[in-house]
Structure formats: structure tokens, C-alpha cells
Amino acid sequence: MTTFHLKADSDDLVYYDEMCAKTAQRLIDFIRSFVSCAVAFSGGVDSAVVARAAFEALGEHALAITGVSPSLASGELEVAQRIAQRIGIRHRVISTRETELAEYQRNDARRCFHCKSHLYGEIFALRENEGFQTILSGTNLDDLGDYRPGLEAATEFEVRHPLAECKLDKKAVRALARWWGLEIWNKPAAPCLASRIAYGVAATEERLTLIDAAEKFLKGLGLDQLRVRLHEGELARIEVPANQLSLLTSEPTRTNVVRMLREMGFRFVSLDLAGFQSGGLNALLKLDANPKLVEK
């Protein structure tokens, strides 16, 4: 088993090593209780840790499955393929069609439910041909504290959540990924592109493509943690860490960003002075006070 060391002869690192070893074994033992499994594998740190543990536990009886659609940001598939290869786990890439669903395009508070229900349904349909019994997700303990209707979809398909069930939060997951030598241990979260579209604004393939192009352009400026939120009227609200705001307000960068995003199709370009906020649009959810966000 690969371990990760920063320095030799450090009491702190010895403790870190021991704790990671115990955590890894607990996770592996949990997954070993299943006969075979398929990991819903995005290529992010959470699903990568589950995939690594699944491979350690079940070997050829573990499979990683990555769903590809217009909601997947550029470069994420390549990352997933590379990480799966390095782990050694069998990897299957499938095309999903959630963006074609009217319920998904409506983009109300239940969009994530419809997306995950479609994904898990597609994975579930492969059980006989691929020879697995249980679907595993990368849901960690911290995820249980946010609004995540996708967890309801997971229940319908009896999806198990090894990280959450083993009481591993994001910090623990990153530590374990680092100890295992996974290069993405500190990779920023990369939720689907639809999470950038304000609730109530239709989640169309054209808008997903627009957001993807804008974020790809901004990453080319040296920004690695950002969101381009799309609001009604094709307004772009750019979020970057507060200490990087000046990078976008200085000239000629500011002018170039406005010009490029307008040429892409945004009508308005704004910069959020509050800075980057993961899952920031969930703050807009007022399910009791705003009936239009609730699925009928």
C-alpha cells in the first residue's frame, strides 16, 4: 500500500501515517462486506478514495463508472480516466442523457434528484452485464449537512455511501487521498455545470456549454478555483477567492474578460465581491416561501 510522507522521523507524521492506515483499513473492510460493486466515479477526490478502497477490497469485482454529458466540465473525463488507470480499477464510461429531461431542464430545487436518479438508473441497468451487485457513491459526512436531493435518488437504488457511513468528512477524505498518493488529494470540488445556473432558469445544453467555455477561459488566466454563475437574462456572476478579485479588476484583464464573455453569449458580466462560495446558489432556496422552486 502506497504511503505519503513529507519528512522522515516526525512524530506528527508517524501519527498521521497510523491514523490514515487505520482509516483506510476501516473503509476497505466496509466495502469488503459487499460481493461486488460499481463506484459512481466522477474523478473527484471523494469518489477517487472510494474507488481506491473498492479496488483494495474487491479487486476485479470492483468497477468505476463515469457518466458523461454536457453537464460535465471540460477536462473532468480525462482526469477520471487517468486516476482510474493509476488506481488499477476497471473503468467504464457511459453517456447519460439527463440534460434531455424536462424535469432537469426546469431547474427547480429538485434538479439534482432527477439528475442522480437518471445516473443511478443507468448504472443499475448495467448490473447484469457488468456483474456487480451494489452501487457506491462518494458522498462524505459533510455532504449530509447540505441540501442534496440526490441522496433521495440514491435511496431508491439502494446506493451505499462508504465515506459517510464510515464517518469520514472532507478533511479526512483528503488526508486519506494524500496518504494513498492520489494526485488529486487537494483538487477543488467540481460539481456539475448545472449547479452554476440559478434555480428557476432553464438548464439547457446551450447554457451548460456557455458556462463551460467561460470557466475554461478564466482558468486560462491562472484562476483554479472559480465559478461562473448564470442568472436570468444571461447574466454572468463570477466568483473567485476574495484574495484574487484584483486579478479580474485590473486592466487589461477586466476589459478582456468582459469582451470574451459577451462574445460567448453572456449579456452582462459581473464580479461577486463576496468571493468564491461553494454551493452558493443553495442559499437562494426558500422552499416554503418560493413555491415555484418546488417540483409539482
Image (spheres, rainbow, N blue to C red):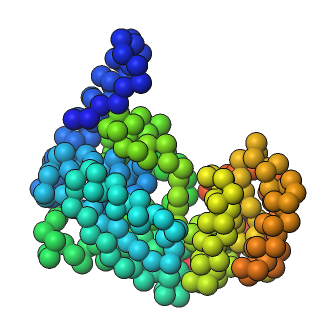
What percent of the width, then of the height, locates residue 19? 33, 25
Q: The C terminus lies in which quarter of the figure?
A: bottom right
Q: Nearer the viewer, residue 111 or 52?
A: 52
Q: Residue at x 40, y 19 (%)?
A: 7
What percent of the width, then of the height, locates residue 140? 42, 47
Q: Quadrant of residue 208?
A: bottom right
Q: Nearer the viewer, residue 97 or 91?
A: 91
Q: Residue at x 52, y 68 (%)?
A: 73
Determine whether, in the image, residue 292 is placed left or right of residue 18.
right
In this rendering, the count of numbered labels is 0
Determine whether, in the image, residue 161 is placed left or right of residue 6.
left
Q: Quadrant of residue 154?
A: bottom left
Against 48, residue 282 (above or below) is: below
Q: Residue at x 36, y 11 (%)?
A: 9
Q: Residue at x 53, y 53 (%)?
A: 189
Against 263, residue 136 (above or below) is: above
Q: Nearer the viewer, residue 165 or 268?
A: 268
Question: Is residue 104 something that shows in the picture?
Answer: yes
Question: Is residue 152 something that shows in the picture?
Answer: no
What percent of the width, then of the height, locates residue 167? 37, 39
Q: The N terminus lies in which quarter of the figure?
A: top left
Determine whether, in the image, residue 276 is placed left or right of residue 178.
right
Judged from this view, the residue extending furthest toward the front is: 252
What percent of the width, then of the height, locates residue 123? 28, 72
